[in-house]
Image: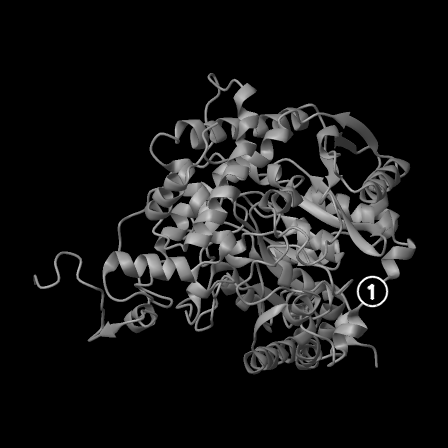
Amino acid sequence: MTDLTRLLAHEMTDLLHSGQVSARELAEAHLAAVERQNPALNAWLTIEPDKALAQADAADRRLAAARAAGQDAVAALPRLLGIPVALKDLISVAGGQCTAGSRILEGYLAPYDAHIVERLRETGAIFPGKTNMDEFAMGSSNEFSAYGPVANPWDLETVPGGSSGGSAVAVAAYHAPLSLGTDTGGSIRQPAALCGIVGMKPTYGRVSRYGIVAFASSLDQIGPLARDVRDAATLLHAVAGRDDRDSTSAPESVPDGLLTITASDDEAAAWLRGKRFGLPREYFVAGMDPDVERRIREGVAALESAGASIEDVSLPHTDYGLATYYIVAPAEASANLARYDGVRYGPRLGDGDVLGNYLATRGQGFGAEVKRRVMLGTYALSAGYYDAYYLKAQKVRTLIKRDFDEVFASGIDALVAPTSPSVAFRFGAKLADPVSMYLSDACTLPVNMAGLPGLSVPCGLSEGMPVGLQFIGPAWSELDLFQVGRGYEAITSGAEWRAKEPAQLALADDPATLSPDQRIAGRA
Amino acid sequence: MANLSRADVEHVAHLARLGLTDEELSRLEGQLNHIVDQYAVFADLDTDAIPPTAQTIELENILREDVAGPSLPFDAVVGNAADRRDGYIVVPPIIGGDET
């Protein structure tokens, strides 16, 4: 029998609808993969086999009832009924832990479901558990999780990227066909690129953040990770749309076209003909890995061969992106994280007086990177520095956004750029210098500053490690981006690298393989 | 751009209510200055005529009727607190230890 975990979500849906596979069989196959490989990968913080199997049985009952009622009833079923979806551990699931990768939320049980969890429950999706992440989504390597780093299944000595590292590995290692992450400066797209899968950050406001642990509220956005473009589009469709409980979720209609992106390579490739892609020269930065740049330029050449026009464009304020981001995001984080005081939830440390409790709870409850950013944000907002830093950064943010607006106003359909300037790096490589870690997101964070959608798709390997190609579009253009991404899949469908699985899956399967923590300790 | 002294770092840590060790304070002094050095790129950028951007999508405030809806169960909400008594969250006294 074929390994069910190797199927794409839309293939699973077809088998579920025809009755060839049950949701329980699917859930069991995925849970077995999680149990077998999590010691080596550490992608999951919570695994919930009992709940997942009960959800699968409920899905099977819905499937059986629909099959009994006829073809139309089956066709009307939600596409994600019975499909496992991994959730980043900052998404509230009622009654379950929600650590956000932090000690300061240890033991906290979410009292309610996030909006996106409610939506997925209605579709009948299965939740195998919660995935590892950088603490409070601050990081680009998943090394800042309080619950240990995550290994990349392409090379267990390297990071998966972050902050949605666990969500990316869960999908890349076939623990689930789909996962949800959040992206504040690249936290979906960069790990998707480093793990060789598809990841999208939708337009700011596309998905309700009710029930999601906040990092930087003017930047955070929820989005899908998947092994192909159609699956990612299906998951976005399931969670997107206005929700009254998040006043920043936009009353924009969600296109149903997300569910009908073509399966035909010919049709998808034809969609690229006549498209105008902008190649922003500032994204090919000094310090970019030359072999990564080659893969990106090969991807661009493939688009051109398919009949798209490639035009050099400039986003002149790109070089200000990093500094702007590292004022705005920490400032917002320092305000959002003020709520963690040990009073209403989480461990309470200290010996009794109010201030002492705060200092101890927060000083010991937060990890190094979170403390660094809270310090940075508090400084940028403090008396005497507000105008020089925070206000200045907000003005530069206007300039960054205008750069994108002008390019799209000139008729460019989408920008094409690297997702990350390098492939996955070794554990520890960027821990000593925070700025070198921050540079991992140089090509993704301007997109958050401008509130735009960005899609990362795999575009080949560099010395055996995945490279991601990023498409950036105007606000609300997710469907266009997915169609472009699908077109790119179509024109590269015969490429040798597409057939490759993560190279160290077999090693992750071996019970003798060390955990990421042991691996790092052994190296020191 | 300004440099952070050790005293500045301690002051910011106090504002942020972070109890940090001497070692952490020393490490942060170096790291924060290194990060703040990156902000020097702003020096040559004239933004006097540029309005600030706080959010990127043009949404207007939407008001709704002020009607009470269903709330979460009390126990589910208070149940996460580290110290509870009789359905309340216990906290240290804020004003004087003995005043009630």
- Give the residue at mark 1: A501
Going by the image, does A353 lie left or right of A432?
A: left
Q: Secondary structure at mark 1?
A: loop
**Quadrant of the frame with the N terminus of chain A:** bottom right
Residue displayed at 37% across by 43% down: B12
Query: Which residue is rendered at x = 87% and y = 61% of the image?
Result: A499
The local crowd at label 1, few if under 14, some if 14 to 19, many if 20 or more residues have their Cα within 10 Å, is some
Q: Please report the residue visible at 45 percent of the width from the left and 42 percent of the height from the top.
A: A376
The residue sitting at the left extreme is: B99
Residue B93 visible in this rendered orientation of the protein = yes
Rendered location of residue A280, percent (x, y): 73, 30
How far across and down, in percent of the image, does residue A147 sit? 55, 67
**In this rendering, is residue A355 above or below B10?**
below
Question: Residue B49, position in %: x, y?
Answer: 47, 16
Rendered position, A271 above or below A277: below
Relative image position of residue B37 (x, y in whole percent): 54, 33
